Image (cartoon, grey):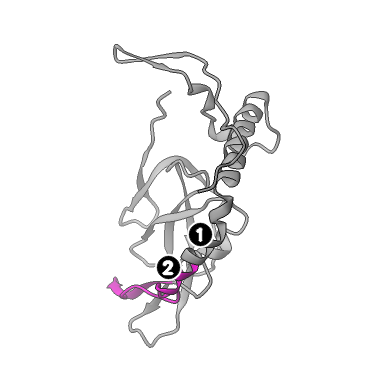
Amino acid sequence: MKNIDTKAPIADKELEILEKHGDVREDNYFWMRLSDAQKLSEVRDEHTTKVINYLEEENTYHDKVTASSRNFEEKLFEEMKGRIKEDDSSVPYKSNGYFYITRFEKGMQYPIFSRKKDNLDAEEQVMFNVNEMAKDFDYFQLGGLNISTNNKLVVFATDTVSRRQYFLRIKNLETGKIYKDIIENTTGASVWANDNKTIFYTKKIRIH
């Protein structure tokens, strides 16, 4: 690493006293915490602007300090990527009359979840192409897939803010329609009841 004539940014210290269950904690950097609403808002408030500006200063400093190794980083990344099978797929597993498969296509970042009825020679039904779902987000995670006992519905969880606070939604696998109903702030796990109408899930408790 070469010597760079630039100073690292120094974050402001703003003392915040936090008390839970009789335990007192002092946090000088609690001001950096942003709520999900602040992260997702198209218009930044003053607090959000301050946090983002500082993080951008950190990123700028990092880019300057590591500029001399940029070519090496790219070469190392391409070498590691070249050792990975990009068009890979999971071992199919059978459940309630369907084979379920998770696969990746070359050059794509996210998986494709599909299934085949009765046997592996059957026509593939793509349930979720996460590459399409994620294209408008900086961060996207799909998980918690759970198929109803009649094989017609799937409940799924998505996280778009990297806080593991998942939205639950339901997709009709016969029509491809995703219902408008959304259950917010869950753990992402869910279970169908045998009536194919009821799901059980757990909410996350937000502790400030």
Pointer 2: what residue? Answer: 80
Q: Nearer the viewer, mark 1 or mark 2?
A: 1
Image position of 162 (left or right of 5)? left
Residue 68: percent from the left, percent from the top? 57, 53
Residue 105: percent from the left, percent from the top? 49, 74
Mark 1: which amino acid? Answer: Glu
Residue 69: percent from the left, percent from the top? 53, 55
Magenta stretch holds residue 110 = no
The residue at the point 51 percent across, 46 percent down is 182
Give above or below for 105 relative to 6.
below
Can the viewer see residue 110 in this picture? no
Between 99 and 81, the one lying in front of the other is: 81
Mark 2: which amino acid? Answer: Met
Image position of 41 (left or right of 139)? right
State the residue lying farthest toward the bottom.
121
Looking at the rendered structure, the secondary structure element under dot 1 is: helix
Say which mark, if any, is on residue 18.
Answer: none
Q: Earlier in the sequence, mark 1 or mark 2?
A: 1
The residue at the point 45 percent across, 41 percent down is 163
Between 20 and 66, the one lying in front of the other is: 66
Looking at the rendered structure, the secondary structure element under dot 2 is: helix
Give above or below for 195 relative to 18.
below
How far is mark 1 from mark 2, CA to CA?
A: 11 Å
The residue at the point 28 percent across, 74 percent down is 94
Q: Residues within 10 Å of mark 1 (few under 14, many from 20)?
A: few
| Range covered by the magenta-colored residues | 78-103
Pointer 1: what residue? Answer: 73
